[in-house]
Amino acid sequence: MNQTSPQPSALSQILGACPHDCPDTCSLLTTVQNGVAIKVQGNPAHPHTAGSLCTKVSRYTERTYHPERILQPLKRVGPKGAGRFETVSWDAALGDIAARLSAIAARDPQAILPYSYAGTMGLVQGESMAARFFNRLGTSHLERTICAAAGGEGLMQTLGGKVGMRVEFFAESKLILIWGSNSISSNLHFWRYATQAKRDGAKLICIDPRQSETAEKCHEHIALLPGTDGALALGLMHELIQNDWLDHDYLDRHTLSWEALKERALQWPPERAAAICGIAPEQIRDLAKDYGASASSRAPAAIRMNYGLQRVHGGGNAVRLIACLPALIGAWRHRAGGVLLSSSGAFPVQRAALQRPDLLAGRTPRTINMSTIGNDLLRPASPEFGPAIAALVVYNSNPVAIAPESAKVAQGFARDDLFTVVLEHFQTDTADYADYILPATTQLEHWDTHSAYGHTDALLNRPAIAPLGEAKPNTQIFRELAARMGLTEPCFADNDEALCRQAYGDAVDFAALLAQGFATLPTPDAPFAQGNFPTPSGKCEFFSQRLAAQGLDGLPDHVPNHEVAHSASAYPLAMISPPARNFLNSSFVNVKSLQTTEGEPLLEIHPIDAAARHIADGDTVRVFNDRGHYHCRARVSTRARAGVVNGLGVWWRKLGLNGTNVNQLTSQNLTDLGHGPTFYDCLVEVTVVPAGV
Ligand code: SF4
């Protein structure tokens, strides 16, 4: 394998890392011929990737060489949102951007807002040089909570961090609860371990409002109403207690406030929980029987949570309750028992070295939540808010498509007095509103270092090909902007390979990353078999003193949705918006082969709900609530449970049927913990759009 550098005339294979927002963080192997990437495949030497990628990233060359790639800087020439641009030189673009940002920063740097998320999960092309640049200027901070914050906070308050089982040991489990996850679509390499366990006799139970591809392949499916996972966990605890399916020794030695949690759980008999979850009480009793059997038989029981379930008002508490469960039955005693939501806490990322918060020099800029960008872009200056947002610099994100209540987001981006710069590969919905679009490199064209949230291997991404056209890595764009704005600190001169080395410092063997593309972190097989949780008490904390000190409930509880199912007669259907199988958030929507497979924006609706509205399969439907309306194609299917519709996302608005997407309907309400969004906490109604409209 030629690993030194891309050789223009030779056939070479370059090791990389998948940059997308997926727990699997695959190791990539890119074959390059005559300077052109001809194939991207999974690295067979990386145990988690095992040589296979998902369909989306298998098409990465199609995405990289897409005819619509932006390969030169573009300057807006039409009205905002119209998407009309002309090419300009880098010199002209950066000169004007530096001048405009400098003028705003001179008045108040907090009027500048960076907006970024997981368009790349790379530590270097994500928040390294960009963070240095914005810290040095003293711009507003962005609260980057749009995906995982509620669940992350739930884990933090219960287990002490984003920690849990090692994913490979799910293969040895005897009972696996797949809770809030369509693993086949969004955690494929975990599914490999789950199917191994299934072959070896494990029982698989899927808990998800949607009858997903994963639910179909499990032994049982519990199709609860969105936002009721906490109630289900409490009902399950009730049954474990009533039947004494408990590991008393583990509870005594390794948990905090068991008696208080027990008292709360005993208020949740299956009938009460089932009424809230919209399921039969027997389903809760049966689930408890299966889960409790593990306590007596010592057969390992494991829970794979994913982030869907925490995108509701009570998402943080729901994760807390589910994270408590393994301690009740002593599941942590086994390496194949426990729970996994995220493993990212295991990575010794040197964030201060990468992002240099010291460049703030004592300043404490305000923080703006990325999920409320719709409201905040429309807010005038005030003593409470500070200056109106005058400039946005967007990278690794497509907020006009992915942020909730997108009509307001688009309205904010359309402000004529807002200066917007977008670093992008394509002319997305957000790029349509930019004053400048700057061409960014893809993962095949730059260096990066990665952590993961579904396994515990650090990865390195080497550039496989030279940047296409005039594209530049994000790091280089911020380096050049810094230079033009007179920011002379030596840290702005660090090159990308140096940044890759700084990401882990001495904590990860960089030579191993260079040689094999990944380095496995030394993590124990059964991290909490003897307690040792990274909480203040060292125990699994059923009661969180830290939350109590904030005036919150120290014990976890079921927190109802902001928009509870059946609570509004005008909007009788609950809507969730899981990703369409061939898309990853709003990435890949414009990759022709994937878009063709996906077809059109779909709304899955149960036959009973469809019949009540005279909706036939394939009809164009109008999905609406007080926040707006969205047209898409109806798929009458039992993938949706009665009373819940599934609006598959996230299509670009301009590729939708009426120039909107499912986020036209979602709200800017936040979660109980972590200030996360509540995409799956949304009531709607659906009607047929008459033909010809
Ligand atoms: S999106 Fe996930 S499964 Fe697909 S290649 Fe990337 S890390 Fe692997």
Image (cartoon, grey):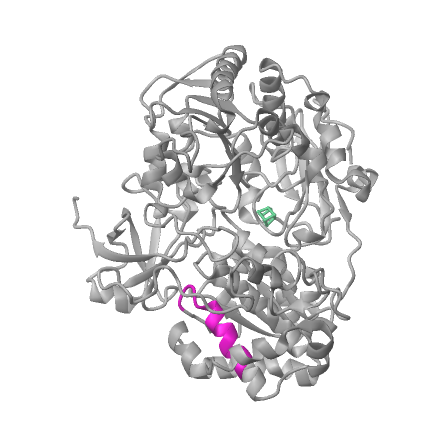
| Residue 655 appearing in the image | no
- Is 233 inside the magenta-drawn segment? yes
State which quarter of the image contains the N terminus. top right
Tell me what residue is drawn at x 53 percent, y 29 percent. 139
Residue 414 coordinates in the image, percent (x, y): 33, 29
Q: Which residue is drawn at 41% across and 80% down?
A: 272
Q: Which of 354 and 89 is in front in this view?
A: 354
* Quadrant of the snapshot with the C terminus: top left
Against 526, is 14 above or below? above
Magenta region, residue range? 225-238
> Would residue 670 appear left or right of 307 to someone viewing this image?
left
| Secondary structure mainly formed by the magenta segment | helix
Residue 286 showing in the rendered view: yes
* Quadrant position of residue 303: bottom right
Q: In this view, does 134 lie above or below 348?
A: above
The x and y percentages for residue 406 are 35, 41
Total number of numbered discs in the rendering: 0
**Residue 378 shown left or right of residue 139 in the figure:** left
Residue placed most toward the observer, 472 or 103: 103
Instruction: Check the image and name the residue furthest to the bottom.
Output: 243
Q: Position of residue 155 (x, y in %)?
A: 61, 60
